[in-house]
Image (cartoon, rainbow, N blue to C red):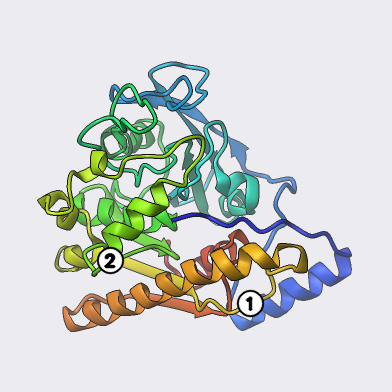
Amino acid sequence: MRVVESKPKTGSRRLTAVLVAVLTAMGLMGTAIGAGQSSAASYAGFWIDACGMPTNGAFGGGSMKPGQVKVQAWRKAGNKRTVILLDGMRAGYNRSGWDIETNARALADHGVNVVMPVGGPASFYTNWDAPSNFNGQRKAYKWGCVIDNRLVPALRSKGFASKGGKYAIMGLSMGGGAALTHAAQRRDLYYAAGSLSGYLTLSAPGMRTALRLAMLDVAPAPWNVDAMWGPPWSPRWTANDPFMLINRMHGLKVFVGSGNGFFGRYNYPGNTFDDLFKGTPLELLAFAQAKAFEAAAFVQGVPVMSYSANGTHAWGYWQDMLWNAKARGFFN
């Protein structure tokens, strides 16, 4: 899905402090520290093997280390948990959108180490069947291997805090469904999974066509969705559909957040067109799918920590969802 980014606004320190106090009291945020502010946690970024997928060049990513994936990370002595944050459809090649657009790194000052794998636009953080021939990709994405088989072992070997050797994983939009899928398929690696405005019923009528159209619109060139999980009738589609994996989520801590498509405090006059004609429809779809997922999970006896409020498909709302999850004990 296309991520519509909201442009940050500045305001007086006093107004910011008031907003933070009000939101904290309402339980919408655990702690809010402005993006870019100093942190007591230390940067602990590193590189991991790319499982043979492209990491350098026009469609592999701008990596300074061919064959390696950059991982941004912040940690603090005494922290007891670590979360892996997955990006959206337009993930950047050199820096995570979570770091650019939100204050997510500040979680490391509040008990939760933060890990952000960089890259993977239009990847759905999965292993692709083949390279995307529409844009000349030279090797197929292997993000399933990178996240599960390279990143998690690296976190363990580097001593990142865990819960019995398991980690939390959370993503937005494209990364939301991917986070739930990774956790459901690899219960040995993850104890908690969160989706923020994710698309959780990929088998629903029209969803495969919707993804096909969305991936044709991802810069710098269109991506061929058939190269990901094969044609629409391929069993890999249902194997990677969070809705179809609910029965494998028993005992997993699950968080599902979405806006309702209505304008909220992060919708600015200068961005009205994108918010109305892109952000609202995307979020309405995510909202509907979140509710369908939650209902199915209830029937199957899988508890879901649910969040919804006014908002469109934009970074400010995902930041609020992240801190709401923290305030409600999702990472515990």
Q: Position of residue 185 (x, y in %)?
A: 19, 52
Residue positioned 39% across, 70% down in the render: 256
> Mark on residue 199?
none
Q: Residue at x 30, y 24 (%)?
A: 139
Decide if residue 311 is on the left or right side of residue 302: right
In percent of the image, x 50 and y 22: which residue is there?
63
Q: Secondary structure at mark 2?
A: loop
Q: Against 135, is 243 above or below?
A: below
Horizontal side of residue 321 vs 267, given as left or right: left
Verify CB contact (< 8 Å) between mark 2 and mark 1: no
Q: Secondary structure at mark 1?
A: loop
* Above or below for 134 versus 255: above
Taking the image as shown, residue 164 lies to the left or right of residue 235, namely right
Q: Which-is-in-front pick, marks 2 and 1?
A: 2
* Amino acid tagged 2: Gly
Label total for image: 2
Residue under pointer 1: 263
| Mark 2 nearby-residue class (10 Å; few <14, some 14–19, many ≥20) | few
Q: Amino acid at mark 1?
A: Phe
> Which quadrant of the view contains residue 92?
top right
| Quarter residue 51 falls in | top left
The quarter of the picture where the C terminus appears is bottom left
Q: Give coordinates of residue 39: x percent, y percent.
A: 69, 46
The mark nearer the N terminus, 2 or 1, is: 2
Q: Is residue 203 above or below residue 160?
A: below
Dot 1: within a 10 Å radius of its alpha carbon, few (fewer than 14), some, or many (20 or more) residues? some
Q: Which mark is residue 206?
A: 2
Residue 70 is at least partly visible in this image: yes
Horizontal arrangement in the rendering, residue 30 relative to residue 157 (left or right): right
Whether residue 179 appears in this view of the structure is no
State the residue in front, 328 or 307: 307
Location of residue 62 in the rendering, given as x and y in whole percent from the top left corner:
52, 23
